[in-house]
Amino acid sequence: MSYQHQNPTAAPATKHTEIDAVVVGAGFAGMYMLHRLREIGVSARVFETGDGVGGTWYWNRYPGARVDSPSMQYSLSFSSEMEQEWNWSEDYSPQQDLEAYANHVADRFHLRDDIQFGTRVVSSVYDEATERWIIETDRGDQVSAKYLITAAGCLSATNVPNFKGIESFEGQWYHTSRWPREGVDLKGKRVGIIGTGSTGIQAITAMAKEVDHLTVFQRTPNFSLPSNNKKMDPDYERGWKARYPEHRQNARESRGGAEVIAYPQQSALEVSEEERNKVYEAAWGQGAFTLIASFTDLMVSKEANDTIAEFVRNKIRQTVKDPVTAELLAPKGYPLGTKRLCVDTGYFETYNRDNVQLVDVKTNQIKEITTRGVRLEDGTDYDVDILVFATGFDAMTGPLFRMGIVGKDGLSLQDKWDAGPRTYLGISTVGFPNMFMITGPGSPSVLSNMTTSIEQHVDWITDAISYLKRNALDKIEATQDAEDRWVEHVNEVADKTLYPHANSWYLGANIPGKPRVFMPYVGGVGNYRRKCDEVAANDYEGFALGATPSS
Ligand code: NA7
C-alpha cells in the first residue's frame, strides 16, 4: 500500500478568517466531521498538529503498533463503496495499514483542501459579544468560527512522567506515541522500556526480536489476551462484506460498538468450574469484547470476575517458563478488564527469551534516570542505550485542556472541570456554547470500538447543526439541569460496575494530581445511541437553543 502523506495542505488561514466551523484534529473523527459538514453546506477548517492525517495512527508508529479491535469492524462505515473496495491485510491491522487507510479516506473525499497540517490550536476562546469562537494556532492563525468541534482523540496528550534526571540521560529516549517516522535502529542496542499497558505490551513483543537486550520496567502487570492475529482470509473478508450493513447495525446496537457473536444469558457463578473454563477456553483468542461477554456478570461481580482473572493468570503461568517471572507478570489486586484489557501477539512468550529481563518497579520504584540509564530506589542501576517511555497519556481531558478552551464569563474548561469532567452526553458542556466534543468524557468513547462511536457522534453533531439551520437557529448549549442529571447517571452506572476498583487512566489515576473520576460512559454503545437519538427527536431536549441577533 502506498500513500502520499505530503499531499497539499490547506493554505494557512489568514488573520481574522471567518468560517462556520473549526475542527481540531484530522484523525478519523476530524476527517469524517469535515466530510459531513461539507455535505450540509457548513464551511470548515481542520487544524492538525501532525503533518498527515490519521491521528492515533499517525502518531503511534512504535514497533508492534496495532489496533486491538478486528479490522473488519475498526473502520468507517459511512461509505459502502469504500467499505467494499478497501481490503485489510490482517485480522488486526498494524499501524501502517491504518495510516494508509486514513490517507485513502482523505484522498477519496478530497479532504486535505480544508485541513491545515503542522498546526496546533493553542487557544479557543468564546467571544460573548459576537457569540463566536476565536481560535488561535501556534502558527499565528486567528480564526473566528460559529462552531468549535474537538476531534483531537482521547489518547493524544502524551504522558512522560517527571522522572528526576531525565535531561541528563546520554542515550536516546522516545515516547512511544512520538516515535520518529524514519524509525529507530534498535539492532545491537540495550533498550529499556518503562510501561506495560497496551502499548508497552505490543512494543516489548516487537522490540525483543530486534534488540541486543531488553529491560522491561513494570509497575503494574496487565491482563492480556492473544489476538491470534493472522493474514486476512479472503473468504472471511468476502463473507463479512456481503453482510456489512447487518454487521454494522449489530455493532451500533451492541454494548462495545463491535459485533459480538452471542450475548451471555448466564452468571459465571451459576455454572460449574469445568463448564466455566470451557466457555473461557472457547472465548480465549476471540478478542477482549468476546471474553468479557462470556457471562453476564464478569464486570459487575468481583466473585465472577475472580474466576476469569484466575483463568488468565493460569494461562500466563503455563506460558512463562520461569515461575518467578510468571508470578510477577500475573496481574493481581484489581479485577480483569478494569484497566484496559490488552490484546497481544505473543507477549508472555517474549519472557522466555534470553535477551529479555523483567524488573519490578512497584516494590522497588524508579528513583531517577541517570546519564547511563535507570536507577531504582535501592540503588540498582540498569544501563541502556535507548530508553522507551510507554507511559501512556493524560487521557480524555488532556487533549481538550491543551487547546486552551475558555467559555462564557472567561471560565476555562480546565477550571470548570477542576474536580473532573462534567458534560451532557459527553458531547457538550454548560458554559461552552456551540462547542461539540467528539467522543468526549461522559460518552462510551474509549470503552467502545472507536470508529463506531466516532461515526455516531459525528452524525449526531451534523444532525444538530442541520436542525439549527432548518429552524433559523445557530446557538446550542447544554442546560445545567441536563448536565447534572447526565453526570449523575454516568457515575451511577460506573459505580454499579467493577471499573472504579482499579487505578486506571479511565479514572485519571495515572496522572499525579488528576481528580479521580470515572470518565467514559459504561452504559453501552446501543443504549447510549438510543438516548442521543431520543434527545434529538425531542427537539434537542436538555439543550437551550437560540439565534444570535445578527443571524
Ligand atoms: P497506559 O495503559 O496508561 O500504560 C502506561 C504504562 O506506563 C502502565 O504500565 C503504567 O503503569 C506505566 N507507568 C506510567 N507512569 C509510570 C511511572 N512513573 N513509573 C513506572 N511505570 C509507569 O498507556 P498505553 O499507551 O499502554 O495505552 C493507552 C491506551 O491506548 C490503551 O489503553 C488502549 O486504549 C490504547 P501503571 O499501570 O500506571 O502502574
Image (cartoon, rainbow, N blue to C red):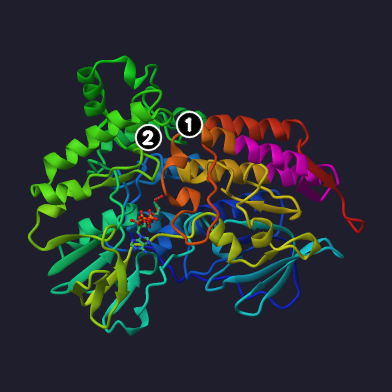
Mainly helix, strand or loop, the magenta region?
helix
Mark 1, Cα crowd under 10 Å, few <14 / some 14-19 / many 20+, is: many
- What is the CA distance from the residue labelled 2 to the residue labelled 1? 9 Å
Mark 2, Cα crowd under 10 Å, few <14 / some 14-19 / many 20+, is: many
Instruction: State whether residue 405 is above or below residue 474.
Output: below
Q: Which residue is mark 2?
A: 289
Instruction: State whether residue 502 is above or below residue 49.
Output: above
Foreground of the two, 513 or 26: 513
Among numbered discs 2 and 1, the one appearing first in the sequence: 1
Q: Which residue is mark 1?
A: 255
Amino acid type at circle 1 is Arg
The verdict on residue 466 being magenta is yes
Q: Which mark is residue 352?
A: none
Amino acid type at circle 2 is Phe
> Would you say residue 479 is visible in this rendering?
no
Position in image of residue 295 (x %, y %): 36, 23
Position in image of residue 241 (x %, y %): 39, 34
Locate the C terminus and report the quarter of the image it occupies: bottom right
Foreground of the two, 108 or 227: 227
Left or right position of 283 against 100: left
Highlighted range, magenta: 462-490
